[in-house]
Amino acid sequence: MELLSGADMIARFLQDEGVEYIYGYPGGAALHIYDALFRQDKVKHILVRHEQAATHAADGYARASGEPGTVLVTSGPGATNAVTGIATAYMDSIPMVVLCGQVASNLIGEDAFQETDIVGVTRPIVKHSFAIRHPSEIPEVLKKAYYLASTGRPGPVVVDIPKDMTAPTERYEYVYPKKVKMRSYNPVTRGHTGQIKKAVELMLKARRPVFYTGGGVVLGNAGDGLTDLVQKLGYPITTTLMGMGAYPQSDNQCLGWLGMHGSYESNMAMHHADVVIAIGARFDDRVTNNVSKFCPTAKIIHVDVDPSSISKTVHADVPIVGPAQSVINEMISLVQGKDIANPDAISDWWEQIEDWRAERAGKLYEPSRDDEILKPQEVIEAVCQKTHGEAFVTTDVGQHQMFAAQYYKFDKPRRFITSGGLGTMGFGFPAAMGIKLNYPDDDVVCITGEGSFQMMMQELSTCKQYGIGVKIINLNNASLGMVRQWQDLNYKSRHAHSYVESMPDFHLLTQAYGFTAITVNTLDELAPALERVFADKHELVFLDVKVDPFEHVYPMQVPLGSMRDMLLSKTERT
């Protein structure tokens, strides 16, 4: 029998669970846990400079690897600083376990120093939460936390740990729990066969079908099966922002991503479809636009592991509750050897889609000349070309995020890492850190803007301490670009607080932390600068690119319109 303190149980459990990195920031209520981590060498602690960065780093790791990220913060402000990152993970269904120190149990409710009811604060933005009531329950609670975070529809789990639960003077038996039993939690492992058969029958009879796939395909590791199914049928496919890469974007059947700033052909195809096969997507408002006008002639097949998502926003004609991978595999077996009912109609449908593609060919943006200020789109295209489309790309939120999604082509899942649901500025840089630590030999690129980067720029210090060689591409337009774009379109260009004045000299700032910085002003400077940026995979380089401040992101859906109602440029609309 092995007797361990609560703090040592946590450290030992993390080892037994296979956790390599834990991201956090110490404080009084968590010091027993920090001392236990200090006395072992298997789990590596990464000291961030702000707790929000810890959650984003763990989140980035989870998105790239599929394994839950782990965070450790102290009570009160330490825990509340983590709230934005917890909400970010919750909105995008990312597995994460957040260990929060808490004041001693006898002080809870007394407004003690650095006391916050973090379970109450985070209740709407976690999949589940636990509060430790006795040290002996720590191994079982932690096992449940990791199981809950990573199964069914993934999400963040908070574990609140009062300081007296980790006291070094009290020791209890430690046994690593290999299994979990939870009567109230039984995630589905396969879809209903009868419903899947109905879906396949509808798919085979379709005349204008479109696959609409989301982050659930990526999270469910269903990309290979999806590619097989789509190519067997020969149907067009469009993805959400979170679903990019599950189907190779370079393939002709892929229409790109859809929605607010999705491609012209994907939005047009969705609007005119007669059957939409939605897999692992939640019909987010950034996709549907006006729900009453969404896909007016389409029958909807909706596959989702979370039953509460089905028919929540858009009525599903054929609902299927189940994980994407098993449902897709069953669909593949059912379509095997069967012919589609309307091949001529499908041929006509593809002809229409190619016409839509041709309408926008060469009209996406006006390239700059060698002596002109760069367009942000051509920077992304150059980065994609330089990295052969194989880098891990994280983004913050705004115009640069949309340009990255539009012009970097992802053929693999888990390569485009962005905050979709919550839209969190400050996400990109620490997320890139979490990925680079775990994939040191890959290029990890953070596409950011000067507004977003300044929210987490203190993490340059973390990168210095741990030798984290991410590449930072700052599309510098001296403004909060997406805010300014909306002000141009809806507020007669009254740019209320959307220009970022008194910006730091990013070159000097980066050098102050001991890193290399490069500034690019024109197109002829870009290629040699990128050569230097990617010369060494293990070196952090900051590339500050001055881009056209007046450029907008297009297409852009017209608010309250249908999917086919889009602004195509400053002077064109559908």
Image (tube, rainbow, N blue to C red):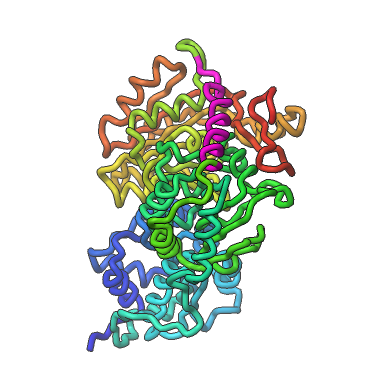
Magenta span has 451? Answer: no
The residue under the point 23% across, 64% down is 41
Instruction: Please report the residue visible at 45 percent of the width from the left and 26 percent of the height from the top.
Output: 379
Task: Place residue 311 in its image quadrant.
Answer: bottom right
Q: Give yes or no for residue 364 being in the magenta stretch.
A: yes
Residue 184 vs 338, above or below: the answer is: below
User: Which is more toward the observer, 38 or 223?
Assistant: 223
Return the x and y of residue 299 as percentages of the image width and height.
63, 55
* Quarter of the image that includes the C terminus: top right
Q: Residue at x 47, y 69 (%)?
A: 191
Majority secondary structure of magenta residues: helix
Q: Is residue 242 left or right of residue 471?
A: right
Q: Please identify the quarter of the rendering in which residue 398 is found.
A: top right
Residue 62 visible to the viewer: no
Q: Residue furthest top?
A: 371
Q: Which residues are magenta?
A: 345-368
Q: How many marks on residues?
A: 0
> From the viewer's perspective, is 84 left or right of 562?
left
Image spot of residue 33 (x, y percent): 36, 71
The residue drawn where x is 50% and y is 27% is 377
From this viewpoint, is residue 303 visible?
A: yes
The quadrant the N terminus occupies is bottom left
- Which of the pair 524/287 is nearer the observer? 287
x%, y% of residue 28? Answer: 44, 68
Residue in the foreground of this view, choosing between 558 and 416? 558
Q: Quadrant of residue 161?
A: bottom left
Q: Residue furthest right?
A: 492
